[in-house]
Amino acid sequence: MRGKVAVIGAGQGGITFSLLWILNKVVPTKNLTLFESPAGGLKKRLDVLQQAESWTFKIANPKDAAKIKSTHEITTLPKVTNDIAEAVTDADYIHILTPAHHHRSLVSSLAPHIDREGAYLIIHSDGVGGTLCARKILHEDTGSKRQQKVRRSVQILGTETLGITCKAFVNIEEGTVTSLLKRQKNNLLATGVPIRPMEKNMAKVQPFFLPTKLQPCNDPLEEGVHDSPAFHALGMLGNVSKIMAVARGDRNPFNFYLSFTKKMTERMERFDKERARISVNLGMEPAKSCRTFLNGAYDIALTDKKGRRRSLHEMLNDRKTPYYGGPEVSPAPSILTHRYLTEELPTRVVPMWSLGKALDMDVPVHQSVIDEVIALGMERIVKEGRTLAAMGISRSGVRKWKETVKQFY
């Protein structure tokens, strides 16, 4: 692809996508710049990314994530900078690949440096209303008239999830960088504002996601609504005692997804039913559940050979999932302040709860999740959640959502 590409966030997704683009010749390496903040004790990690002579890229067998299909030593590396202005200036495509709870602050930081009219801001796994939050920031009346015009011309795209299952390891002691691509999803919901005409603009960014196929949505909430946070958020809350035991050293690490009991997955299914009701009341198709996600992303059968409905618990324990295996395949977090809570609560649970409340709906499972997080002393991440105001929408606008959507295009 032509043009400069900026990747905001040199974490697991940023490193893996960059290596995938280099390996598949999607982006010339000289046109690719990664931004990583040195804040929060990341300076040594940043030094390794900047000084390593090569990065190792491993690709797992798509049928067995525990087995490596191929290994590549990438020696022609992208530029890594801690200067967000250097990364964003002159960029035609800006990819945000960080936990979703950082998206709003990052968009605020990079906004003054966008200088390409019609540039694409691609927010990977943007949660519920992420594109609307970004639009609100980019459309603020700050800076010169020229800057405002450029910012308002930006095409904002959001995807429901990351699109890949991956891990990246930056070994500070050894000075090495290793990325493991476990799986690429078959399909990925995407939407944006204004992204018109939808098909043309989606086709323009599709090469970044191949072989995953982008499926465009015509509603800026829809792709986030369809990504369930049940696995992460409810999985964490159901495993609090185990996670705390691992943190104390009282028990060994465990496989996060395979730890979900039938009782936990039954609660996840009730949670997904609430999400489906909210989406229908907004005039959308019923929100995808964890079951439909597993089926669409990894071809996990919804029914058994006799045509009987498989429960979420049964589907999760299917050997075809990328989670199947020991603790090393899908290790559970060892702290409660993990992104599975700190990201999923404010960017997926809270906005859906807010939308449900605006529609005068009873959402007891969402309410119980929020109450449990507050009881754990994590009220801050609830308060930092995406409210209607943060998304630039009103209670009355939610009530007539299909009419409200038209203003964003």
Image (spheres, helix red, strand yellow):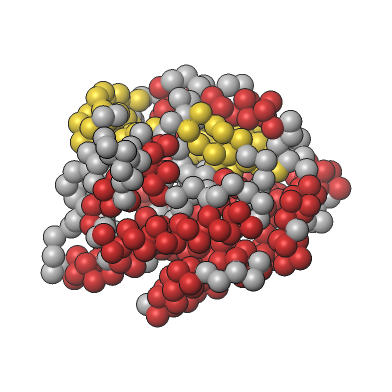
Q: Nearer the viewer, residue 282 or 128?
A: 282
Is residue 123 among what the camera can see?
no
Based on the displayed image, in which of its 4 quarters is residue 318 positioned? top left
- Residue 347 vs 402, above or below: the answer is below
* Percent of width and height locating residue 34: 50, 39
- Report the residue at 35% width, 25% height from top: 74
Q: Is residue 149 left or right of residue 125?
A: right
Residue at image point 30% right, 62% down: 264
Q: Please name the residue shown 24% across and 24% down the image.
A: 69
Q: Which quadrant, please, contains the N terminus? A: top right
For the point 26% across and 48% down, which residue is it? 314
Q: Quadrant of residue 88?
A: top right
Q: Position of residue 384 (x, y in %)?
A: 55, 69
Closer to the camera, 139 or 350?
350
Above or below 245: residue 106: above
The image quadrant where one finds the C terminus is: top right
Decide: is 132 above or below 52.
below
Q: How many marks?
A: 0
In the picture, measured across the screen, residue 56 lies left or right of residue 145, that is left
User: Furthest residue to the right?
Assistant: 145
Left or right of 115, for residue 205: left
Q: Residue 4 location, x and y as percent? A: 60, 29
Q: Is residue 404 visible?
A: yes
Q: Position of residue 50 (x, y in %)?
A: 41, 39
Q: Is residue 59 left or right of residue 281?
A: left
